Image (cartoon, rainbow, N blue to C red):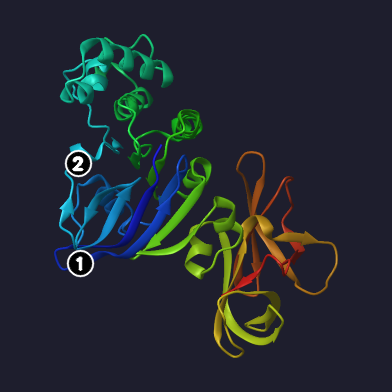
Amino acid sequence: MASLRVEDLHVRLGANDILKGISADFRDGGVVALLGRSGSGKSTLLRSIAGLETPERGRIHIGDRTIFDAAAKVNLPPEQRDLGLVFQSYALWPHKTVFDNIAYGLRLRKQPREAVDRAVREVMVGVGLEGYGERLPSQLSGGQQQRVALARALVYSPPLVLLDEPLSNLDAKLREEARVWIRGLIKRLGLTALFVTHDQVEAMAIADRIMLLEGGRMVQDGTPEQLYTEPQSLFAANFMGVNNTFVGRVVERRGGEARLEVGGLSLWGQQRGGTKSEESATGVIRVEELELASSPGENRLPAHLDSSIYVGGRWEHLFQLAGHTLRATTRNALSPGAYTLSFPKERLWIF
């Protein structure tokens, strides 16, 4: 295991600033997801740690080793950083067997044959590939090819494993299965892992901690639960869930609460981000937090159910409310008609 520390990392590609001063600590034995949209800088950060991109400024340390320091002109090449790398494309040698693909890195390091054989067979058992050593990549499923790529990254016991969207080539069912066994394997081996993804569900399933990036900067850093239930910005709230949103203005505040007026409708919620009275603001409530109520009251509004779809284990409904289309979920089917929707004020965020 090894800790990773990134300090004030800046990366420019052509005329574009891709990373704009990223600093972060990654603890021993943790699985950290770098989450963000395309172009947010997450893959560039991972590639900088791997030595595949050269930052303009900043420092990178693994344990007590400095592997990059722009000011001191330290820049170890990728092969000297001893990191495990797993990419989206898997990058397997098509003419080499599973065994030889996994053994490739050890043979480059001039390891004795007996040590190579032992290490490869151990890691093949660990990733569920026992008995597949003589097959070619073309004879494997997508999920099996992904396991070969992961085994190749783990076979020489690297201090840190970097995974760049390794599940994106798998179908939905395999992705769900892979999330479980990859996290289980990483935790069982006690590895420190950095996992790049644009999928917030994948990040929450695999990671102990999520770093949300946007525009080359860190937006929020915390546990999956913290990012989902305590977003610090409208961007984080929208990125981490499926929401109903309303644009209006704040007309009253009390303590940490604010009252949002939206086209004649009035809703109380939790104030986030320092919005002042009479300023434009956005209300956000997760789809699963919108509730049905039996009677009128504060934060309860009449709505009309237009349509419903069954999505496995629950029903998703579309309501119309004063020109707004709202989504809500229930365990049971509902008939079209008039309903009262409840907006729990502790779960309605106003940014």
Question: In x, y percent, where is residue 44?
Answer: 27, 54
Question: In x, y percent, where is residue 142?
Answer: 34, 26
Question: In x, y percent, where is residue 306?
Answer: 65, 59
| Frontmost residue, 330 versus 298 | 298
Name the residue beneath numbered marker 2: 78
- Extreme-right residue of the structure: 295
Q: Is residue 116 above or below residue 36?
A: above
Q: Nearer the viewer, mark 2 or mark 1?
A: 2
| Frontmost residue, 351 versus 283 | 351
Q: Is residue 304 above or below residue 54?
A: below
Corner quadrant of residue 113: top left
Q: Residue at x 37, y 57 (%)?
A: 37
User: Would residue 153 be found to the left or right of residue 255 on screen?
Assistant: left
Name the residue beneath numbered marker 1: 16
Q: Amino acid at mark 2?
A: Pro
Q: Residue at x 19, y 52 (%)?
A: 53
Determine contact: label 2, label 1, CB under 8 Å: no
Query: Do we see residue 326 in this rendering?
Result: yes
Corner quadrant of residue 108: top left
Q: Amino acid at mark 1?
A: Asn
Q: CA distance from mark 2 to mark 1?
A: 24 Å
User: Would residue 335 be found to the left or right of residue 46 on screen?
Assistant: right
Who comes first in sequence, dot 2 or dot 1?
Answer: 1
Q: Is residue 59 above or below residue 315?
A: below
| Frontmost residue, 338 versus 270 | 270
Question: In x, y percent, where is residue 176?
Answer: 49, 34
Secondary element type, mark 2: helix
Q: Quadrant of the C terminus?
A: bottom right
Secondary element type, mark 1: strand
